[in-house]
Amino acid sequence: MRVKDLRIVVAICRTGSFSKAAEALRITQPAVSQAVKRVETDLQIRIFERASSPITLSNEGTAAVKSIEKVIELIDGIRANGRDGARTRLGVTPLLSGRDVARLLNRSFEAHRQSFDVEFLDSSILSSRADFDAKIVMPSLRRRSSLFIDLMTVWIGVRNGVFIYSRQEADVWEQARLVLQSSSIPVERVIEVNDCGYAYHMAASGAGFSPCVLTAENGFREHQIPDMPALPNIRLDIFASHDFGRELKANLLGS
């Protein structure tokens, strides 16, 4: 039994005639009639009372159509799940910019024609979750990946005594705080924000200074402060299948 034929039967029920169903489905009326005949032959029942106008269901047809609608719903659900299963879930540290991830996904999409669901979350949250197909995160003490990249971290903004601190991916800012303390750089005030992107933008707008992880598509390079003490590089681990992980690494490095 063809699923297309079942859909035609349902369309007739909804429109009230063979001709209107044909018009709605953009097929010929003979094709509609043939589909109904095949379904009736397979089920060994008469579905429609053809003498009436609009067309009505026979007693047997009324029960059959309810079952047909359930079958179509089930098939559509299976197909939808199949499409969802083809989507790759990617968890990403917000230290990567949206432009970094867009470039990364564009390259991967060209290679595989697959769809992606992306979540930007703190590495501490991503590390504890197992519902991602791939993750790009700061390493934890308990787990590290053999696939990783090292990114340069620099100071951006203006040196005005205001340290802009992000509670998101706070390890980066804690390392920067230690560098400030060891270098005797005066900090008169600390502004704490919830998002590392906000910290970048505030520093770039002249509100203070902040560490900034330089990625391939980072838009804050022109706001670097040249006379500040050096910051340690930041490592990002890639957790994914071997081939996809290597692909992500190459795309992040721009190679």
Image (cartoon, rainbow, N blue to C red):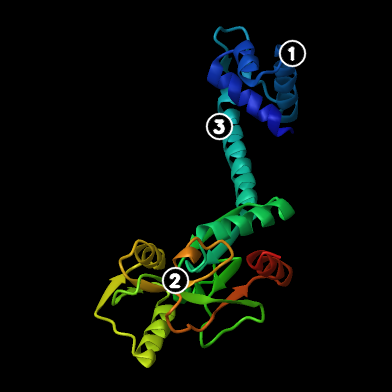
Q: CA distance from mark 1 to mark 3?
A: 24 Å
Per the rendering, the mark at residue 229 is none
**Is residue 58 visible in the rendered structure shown here?**
no
Q: Decide: marks 3, 2 in contact (CB < 8 A)?
A: no
Residue at image mark 1: 30
Q: Secondary structure at mark 3?
A: helix
Taking depth in this image into account, of 158 and 51 the one nearest to the observer is: 158
Residue at image mark 3: 66
Crowding around mark 2 (Cα neighbors within 10 Å: few <14, some 14 to 19, many 20+) is many
Q: Residue at x 57, y 7 (%)?
A: 52
Judged by depth in the image, the label closer to the viewer, 3 or 2, is 2
**Is residue 121 visible in the rendered structure shown here?**
yes
Mark 1 or mark 2: which comes first in sequence?
1
Give the side of residue 9 with respect to residue 96, left or right.
right
Residue 107, quarter of the rendered image: bottom right
Per the rendering, the mark at residue 122 is 2
| Image spot of residue 114 (x, y percent) | 67, 52
Q: CA distance from mark 3 to mark 2?
A: 48 Å
Q: Which quadrant is home to the C terminus?
A: bottom right
Q: Decide: marks 1, 2 in contact (CB < 8 A)?
A: no
Judged by depth in the image, the label closer to the viewer, 1 or 2, is 2
Give the side of residue 85 with respect to residue 234, left or right.
right
Q: Work out whether 254 lies above or below 189.
A: above
Number of disc labels: 3
Q: Work out whether 103 lies above or below 174.
A: above
Q: Residue at x 30, y 66 (%)?
A: 207
Taking depth in this image into account, of 200 and 88 the one nearest to the observer is: 200
